[in-house]
Image: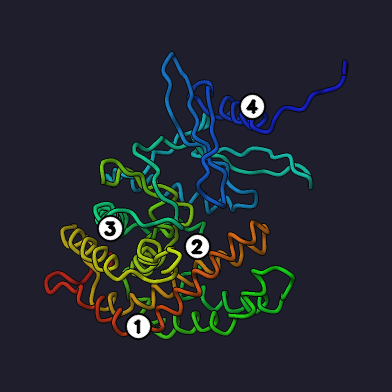
Amino acid sequence: MHGQSVSKPPHVEIFDQLKTIVAKHYDIGQVMSAERNPRGYINASYDIEAERDGTRTQYLLRQYRSGTHENRICFEHALMKELLSRGFGFSPRLITTKHGTTYAKVAENRKEGEKESFVAVFSYLPGEDKFTWDDPLCTVEELETAAEVFAHYHNAIYGWEGVSSWEEPRIIDQISLMRKQWRVQGQEVGDSPFNSYFLEYSDSLFGVLDNAMYFPTKEVYDGLPHLAIHGDFHPGNLKYSKGKISGLFDFDWAKMDTRCFDVGLAIFYFCTSWGVNSDGDLLVDRVELFLDSYQKAAKETATLGPLTTLELQILPQMIVAGNAYILDWIRGEFCETRPDADEFLRYLRHGVKLMKWLEQNWTSLKNLILRKRYSGRGSFTPP
């Protein structure tokens, strides 16, 4: 064996790569340990511990997926810095590089050659990781405090206009793009159970898009409160301590859109059952608790106030749109990366089952949501 190189185990090789990246780009000391954080599908995250001057500190290091647009990262980081400047105490702090930037460009060796990707380091939020997006049924106390934090987030960031270098389609504009992409997917039968199921329910899936677009009109939508939505507010993107929320993270899906879409998407995440016998059922008691807590916290905020009557009228469509938004991610992720087919078929079935539940319970859901109007402050003033 003399003279032959012995390959390192993958975990050792990754650890060496992380040590090199941090030493080259950051001034936080030497990386002493690193563990892959299993949460998240798009980017690779690592819980790292670095030692500097005899003191060890935990951080989260994120390596963005190859192909991530640099301006998207700029938007995410500008948002996080804005939150910090406005006193929002739940989000992590960005660790600046030796060059004063909030992310570093690193070379990645891939089969197709060397590619550039981006790395960022964040302060480590206190608390416990307890849930995932497909295991979201937190306790009642955790649900209520999550809604309160969500209202405070919306109030904190309202009025910020984003950055001119990055703009994503709003959900009302994105639906028409989804239609074209889903049409192509429906024509690709393939031999995967995922593709077969998509094809079987393609008519119903297009119905989701039609229902999401039924109301509001673009003119009405344009007049709703717009802000930098979190875009992925679910129990798996929160930290918990003693039944309370101690941190909010993963702003990489943030974009400019309406508050009521962000709330509709959050209700999809927090209040839909994944149980064997109730998969896809929207748990209305949890919807009510979430909205009660959100409205109460929002009523006490200085800027935005609670959801208006018009926002509440539109909110059922935004739950539908949230379901379509995630179905579109499921479809796109499956087509692009070919992940575990059984896992993604489960996600797809979940969305179809929720779609059916919404169709069957539409009137009662609308009535429940409209009961959450506040007779006092229920309007917003455009910034």
Secondary structure under badge 3? helix
Q: Which of marks 2 and 4 is in front?
A: 4
Horizontal arrangement in the rendering, residue 1 relative to residue 358 (left or right): right
Residue 33, percent across and down?
53, 25
Residue linked to disc 3: 147
Q: Is residue 70 visible?
A: yes
Residue 51, percent across and down?
47, 20
Q: Which of marks 2 and 4 is nearer the N terminus?
A: 4
Q: Tag count in the figure?
A: 4
The vertical placement of 26 against 368, above or below, is above
Whether tag 2 and tag 4 are in contact, CB under 8 A, the answer is: no
Residue linked to disc 4: 16
Q: What residue type is labelled 2?
A: Glu
Label for residue 167? 2
Alpha-carbon distance for marks 3 and 4?
40 Å
Characterize the local packing of mark 2: few (<14), some (14-19) or many (20 or more) Cα atoms within 10 angstroms.
few
